[in-house]
Image: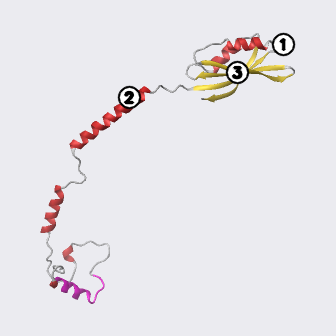
Amino acid sequence: MGFGDLKSSSGLKVLNDFLTDRSFIEGLPGVKKPLGQYGPTGVADTTSSGPAASKDEDDDDIDLFGSDEEEDTEAAKLKEQRLAEYAAKKAKKPALIAKSSILLDVKPWDDETDMAKLEECVRSIQMDGLVWGQSKLVPVGYGIKKLQISCVVEDDKVGTDILEEQITAFEDYVQSMDVAAFNKI
């Protein structure tokens, strides 16, 4: 069963005679059959698997997706070298220090409180990672003014709770303290 050798004139004549009364060779689309089973019955299959087998053997010699161990070791060495260079470069950079800008409202007991002395007491608080900024007096009402003072703190060294404890420790001048604004830098 088959058309014979389609490269010869006799094989082409058999195929042409077969297709004179048919528009297709045989079978349903998507059905795979061995090549020799297509065509009219009674015609011998002249296609052989000999040359195809030799092609397969030739294909086995060339492994396109295989890996060469020498290339893998070279790639691994290159990768390790690049990682070491990156780590050395990263180690040279200083670590980023997280800082925050805080705006504090310090409220006095009454309108007779000495605000200059209050500001002096607040600025007397010195800590590692704390830098005092500008300040101003803001009217609250009935002649009472609050001290609004800014500071920059390193987050790892100074916290708002520590600042609040130390500022409210000046009981003669400070009634309360609030954090008006807190911004990460």
What residue is pinned by disc 2?
A: 88
Using the numbered discs, state the Cα–Cα distance from disc 1 to disc 3 in whole angstroms.
23 Å
Q: Give the residue at x 21% y 74%.
A: 35
Instruction: Looking at the picture, tell me which residue is in the foreground, 16 or 143.
Output: 143
Please report whichever mark, 1 or 3, sits nearer to the chain's N-terminal start.
1
With 152 as the anchor, is 113 left or right in this view? right
Answer above or below: position of 179 versus 173. below
Using the numbered discs, state the Cα–Cα distance from disc 1 to disc 2 in whole angstroms.
61 Å
Q: Quadrant of residue 43?
A: bottom left
Identify the mark at residue 134; answer none if there is no mark.
Answer: 3
Where residue 87 appears, x then y in whole percent? 38, 30
Q: Quadrant of residue 77?
A: top left
Type of secondary structure dominating the magenta stretch: helix
Instruction: Looking at the picture, tell me which residue is in the foreground, 52 or 70.
Output: 70
Amino acid, disc 2:
Ala
With 98 as the anchor, is 82 left or right in this view? left
Using the numbered discs, state the Cα–Cα distance from disc 3 to disc 2 in whole angstroms.
41 Å
